[in-house]
Amino acid sequence: MERGKQTGAGNFILLGFSDDTDLQSLLFGLLLSMYLVNVLGNLLIVLATISDSHLHTPMYFFLSNLSLADISFTSIIIPKALRNIQTQSRVITFAVCISQICFFFVFGRQNNLLLALMAYDRFVAFCHPLHYAAMMNSQLCQLMALGSWLISILGSLPDTLTILRLYFCTNRKIPHFFCDLPELLKLTCSDTLINNVVLYSVAIILAVFPLTGILLSYSQIFSSILRISSDRGKYKAFSTCGSHLLVVSLFYGTSLGDYFSSVATLSSRMSLMASVMYTMVTPCSTLLSIV
């Protein structure tokens, strides 16, 4: 294929969902309603955590940070997709495309770290209840939250900066409704070995390691719960962890679905559905944590 200009010049075309006008109207309404539920619901969690003194606990502090990350995560993707459907324009500039990729990684990886911190909070509460106040004091929680934000920001830079070295071919059509890095790499005429090494290396550090921490925390929690003698006590203990476990399951389940749909030889429609689940349904699942 003919080599195009170096990255930084030219636009890309987002093929989106469908050319069917009626279907696009349905998708517009569906995406808009899910986006509003996500933003308003998570915003209520943040405001409630700030205003209600009874919610000034480590778990709700981390939950409010998770809600902010979820609002930001969907806001970098869905408004642009809604605008493209409304205006029938599929063009996205290189700068906006790179910004989407960068912040997609920032807020996505921030979710990984915050879910791990919430699991650690439950681990301390169940396995070290007498030391909980000292081990999860306000200052330490703030430092852990700040550290997670800094790590997620720094962790997104390698993936983003390595894109700048690529040349793109004349075909600049992305079969997606946002700039997805795996789809973008398929359009380049350059060698993507460095990009793939960086992508998977950072993923192992900022996705696999937090997931391992979550699994280890809950293995200790379950072991502690099983030592409770009364059935009522066990039920109450499990119920306090259930909502967080559901969010973790949805987040990693949809993340894996989105990943395998992008690397496997699946239809573009299947890949799009997996991405919708990841970008819209998962952030809304944070609302389950307050149930």
Image (tube, grey):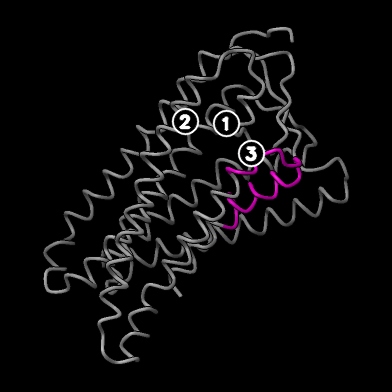
Q: Are marks 2 and 1 in contact (CB under 8 Å)?
A: yes
Give the quarter of the image for residue 192: top right
* Identity of the residue drawn at 60% across and 24% down: 185
- Along the polypeptide, which appears first: circle 2 or circle 3? 2
Please indicate whether residue 244 sits to the left or right of residue 54 in the image. Answer: right
Q: Height in image: 53 above or below 168? A: below
- Along the polypeptide, which appears first: circle 1 or circle 3? 1
Q: Check if residue 270 falls in the magenta segment.
A: yes
Residue 128 place in picture, x, y as percent:
16, 70
Secondary structure beneath disc 1?
helix
The residue that label 1 is drawn on is: 181
**Nearer the camera: disc 1 or disc 3:** 3
**What separation in Å lies between label 1 and label 3 (alpha carbons)?**
10 Å
- Residue type (three-letter) at the residue carrying disc 3: Ser
* Identity of the residue drawn at 55% across and 34% down: 100
Q: Nearer the viewer, residue 94 or 269?
A: 269
The residue that label 3 is drawn on is: 262
Q: Are marks 1 and 3 in contact (CB under 8 Å)?
A: no
Please indicate whether residue 100 sits to the left or right of residue 5 in the image. Answer: left
Secondary structure beneath disc 2?
helix
- Along the polypeptide, which appears first: circle 2 or circle 1? 1
**What separation in Å lies between label 2 and label 3 (alpha carbons)?**
14 Å
**Disc ID at residue 199:** 2
- For label 1, count other residues whose C-alpha is less than 10 Å away and answer few (under 14), some (14-19) or many (20+): many
For the record, the magenta segment spans 259-281
